Image (cartoon, rainbow, N blue to C red):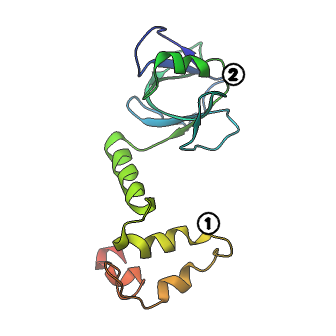
Amino acid sequence: PESNRPGQKAGDEVSLRSTGPLPTTHNFTRGDYVLVTTPNSWLPSDKLDIARAYGSIVGEVMGILPPPDFGINVKLIGLKQDLIMKFMGKTCRLDRAANHVTFSRQIEALKELCGKPPAPQLAWLRQILLCADEPGGAGHEPVHCGQLHGGPGCPSRYDLLSQANPAQL
């Protein structure tokens, strides 16, 4: 990243420059929410190591750089200028997030689902969704979905199709 307007307050706009043309299938448009992750070899994460300038920062696409430049202008959200400057000159990757409303809903849902302690009414769903992340849990999702349960807020079966309306089948 390189700063477009040094000295601005939090939410500064930066240019993410590419060494060549963006793929024709990139489909980034103004207003898209993105995760800017540095270094470019890292996967997006909620961890941010300011000292080493590693991690993911939420941003909003402001536009595509006009030719002869290659890249995207992004407004970084939640970091002050002095912290943004630590990320300047580093390689990064850009991953699309959802629009602001969907992004906020996803974050709230993840907080409910993965909070400590998890919301009791969602424990059954959390068990199914995160099963593969537990040691030896991969492939057990169908077993969990077929078990009878019936705890608070839990359907009597994990058979999610039984809860679907005809249009969802």
Residue 65, can we see it?
A: no
Residue tagged by mark 2? 19
Residue at the (35%, 46%) spot, across then down: 104
Mark 1 closeness class: few <14, some 14–19, many ≥20 residues within 10 Å: few
Residue tagged by mark 1? 133
Residue 31 placement: quadrant? top left
Q: Earlier in the sequence, mark 2 or mark 1?
A: 2
Please state if 48 lies on the left or on the right of 30 as rendered.
right
Residue type marked 1: Asp
The answer to whether 75 is drawn above or below residue 145 in the figure is above
Residue at the (67%, 40%) spot, across then down: 42
Residue 57 x/y as whole percent? 51, 33
Residue 117 placement: quadrant? bottom left
Residue 92 x/y as whole percent? 63, 30
The answer to whether 104 is drawn above or below residue 65 in the figure is below
Identify the secondary structure beneath mark 1. helix
Tag of residue 43: none
